[in-house]
Image (tube, helix red, strand yellow):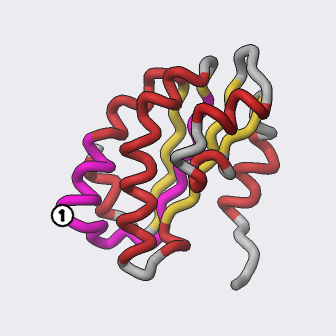
């Protein structure tokens, strides 16, 4: 999974607990840097908020790593909760992780539009 940092752009898609292999990549980026990686896209679709909450500290640490290196656009993250929940519960659960909260949505992602925005990003 650490091959992710061998390319300028990497797209990672995970479902539920399938985010686990990405943990090694996060730790590698935090400890060793991002290598050739200029932009990392992570789309995570998860049924329950408890699973997201378990990985929130690591995702927050990864975000802060990019932010503190003055490279905030290097990480693109979206989390979609497909199970039964509401926005208030998400906000309360992720209140210590505002970056993650702002990128967490209820329901399945529109994969066509999401992937289109990755493949054809707007010019900055």
Please give the residue where the numbered disc 1 appears in the rendered image: 32
Q: Residue 33 vs residue 52: left or right?
A: left
State the quadrant of the N terminus: top left
Image x and y of residue 14, in percent: 51, 33
Q: Which residues are magenta?
A: 24-45
Which residue shows up at 38% across the image and 56% down it?
62
Which residue shows up at 66% across the image and 59% down it?
118
Q: How many neighbours does mark 1 have within 10 angstroms: few (below 14), some (14-19), or many (20 or more)?
A: few
Image x and y of residue 109, in percent: 76, 36
Q: Residue 94 vs residue 71: left or right?
A: right
At mark 1, the secondary structure is helix
Q: Residue 43 vs residue 39: left or right?
A: right
Using the image as rendered, state which of residue 1 and residue 16 is in the foreground: 16
Using the image as rendered, state which of residue 90 and residue 105 is in the foreground: 90
Q: Is residue 83 above or below residue 68?
A: above
Which residue shows up at 79% across the image and 26% down it?
86
């Amino acid at each position: 999974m650490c091959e992710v940092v061998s390319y300028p752009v990497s797209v990672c898609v995970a479902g539920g607990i399938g985010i686990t292999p990405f943990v090694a990549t996060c730790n590698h980026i935090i400890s060793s840097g991002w290598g050739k990686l200029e932009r990392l896209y992570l789309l995570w679709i998860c049924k329950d908020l408890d699973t997201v909450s378990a990985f929130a500290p690591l995702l927050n640490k990864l975000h802060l790593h990019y932010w503190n290196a003055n490279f905030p656009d290097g990480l693109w993250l979206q989390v979609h909760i497909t199970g039964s929940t509401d926005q208030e519960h998400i906000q309360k659960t992720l209140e210590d992780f505002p970056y993650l909260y702002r990128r967490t949505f209820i329901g399945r992602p529109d994969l066509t539009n999401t992937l289109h925005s990755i493949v054809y990003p707007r010019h900055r």
